[in-house]
Image (spheres, helix red, strand yellow):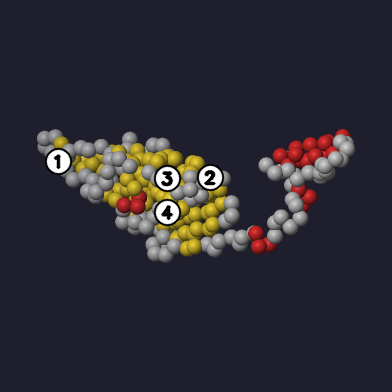
Amino acid sequence: MKVWTDLPLHQNEATKPQTFNNNFEKVLNEFNGNLNGNNFPMYAVQTNDIANPGQATGFSGAVSGFEIELTSQGFYSIRRSSSFEGSTDVYTPILVLDLKTDDWSKGWNNLNYFSGFSQFGLNFDAREGMLVGCATIDWAHGTDTLSATTGDPPVSFQAVRGHDWVSQWGVFVNDVMVGRTGEIPPKRHTCSIPFSIPCGSQNIKVDVRWISNISDYNTSGAPHGTVFEVYSAEIWTRNVVR
């Protein structure tokens, strides 16, 4: 750390206690963040040395967001919402997935791979430092109605099953999980997942993924399909430069 002294020492000058005491206090004050114009040499920082902040860059298409590059930090955000990005209201899902008939994985499912969210996910060039952010997802996972026939004479009945089914959401930075919700039972939820992770000067990809488990069973009747719905998703992150 460069220290600008209050009382400089000159060649062949007599040693004075005041010089050492004042300069020693100056070092302690700088460690405490007590900097002012007297700590810098004349004309050390001028107007031309201060760069203007970068302009916000918007996104086009089915998502909205921005990128703002500042001197010591950057802000990045992306959103796909049923209320704002080309849909109708908060009650109309963007993604409707029938977990009995549609294609999905028993492992982690990247939201980018499904219809309506193909452009969702942050992709930017970070600078060495920290990433601090949060992902918010508005989603629902329902139960199932089992229709079956049993007995002699046959009796038809219906029963609700799926109260023990659980789903989870996770945030991934360059395919590494940095935050997760834990197991959530069937219902409509709005989940916020904060995360933070050190990063280098590199390309950064941030996405959200979900995992769900349902029971497979056979029935002589026709079971109703259990549905996984996503109404909106948003990711924002702050890149604090080291």
- Residue at 70 percent of width and 44 percent of height: 2
* Disc 2: which residue: 129
Q: Looking at the image, is mark 2 or mark 1 nearer the viewer? A: 2
Q: As shown in the figure, which amino acid type bears the numbered disc 2?
A: Gly
- Decide: few, some or many residues near mark 3? Use Cα within 10 Å; few <14, some 14-19, many ≥20: many
Q: Earlier in the sequence, mark 2 or mark 4?
A: 4
- Decide: few, some or many residues near mark 2? Use Cα within 10 Å; few <14, some 14-19, many ≥20: some
Q: Which mark is residue 220?
A: 1
Q: Earlier in the sequence, mark 2 or mark 1?
A: 2
Q: Which mark is residue 173?
A: 3
Q: Would residue 232 appear left or right of 20 to someone viewing this image?
A: left
Residues 79 and 163: in front is 79
Cβ atoms at labels 1 and 3 below 8 Å apart: no
Residue 238 pos. (x, y %): 53, 50
- Decide: few, some or many residues near mark 4? Use Cα within 10 Å; few <14, some 14-19, many ≥20: some
- Residue at 47 percent of width and 59 percent of height: 65
Q: As shown in the figure, which amino acid type bears the numbered disc 3?
A: Val
Q: Would residue 120 appear left or right of 151 to someone viewing this image?
A: right
- Residue at 30 percent of width and 40 percent of height: 107
CA separation in Å, label 3 and label 2: 14 Å
In the picture, residue 6 is in which quadrant? Answer: top right
CA separation in Å, label 3 and label 4: 10 Å
CA separation in Å, label 1 and label 4: 48 Å
* Disc 4: which residue: 123
Q: As shown in the figure, which amino acid type bears the numbered disc 4?
A: Asn
Q: Looking at the image, is mark 2 or mark 4 nearer the viewer? A: 2
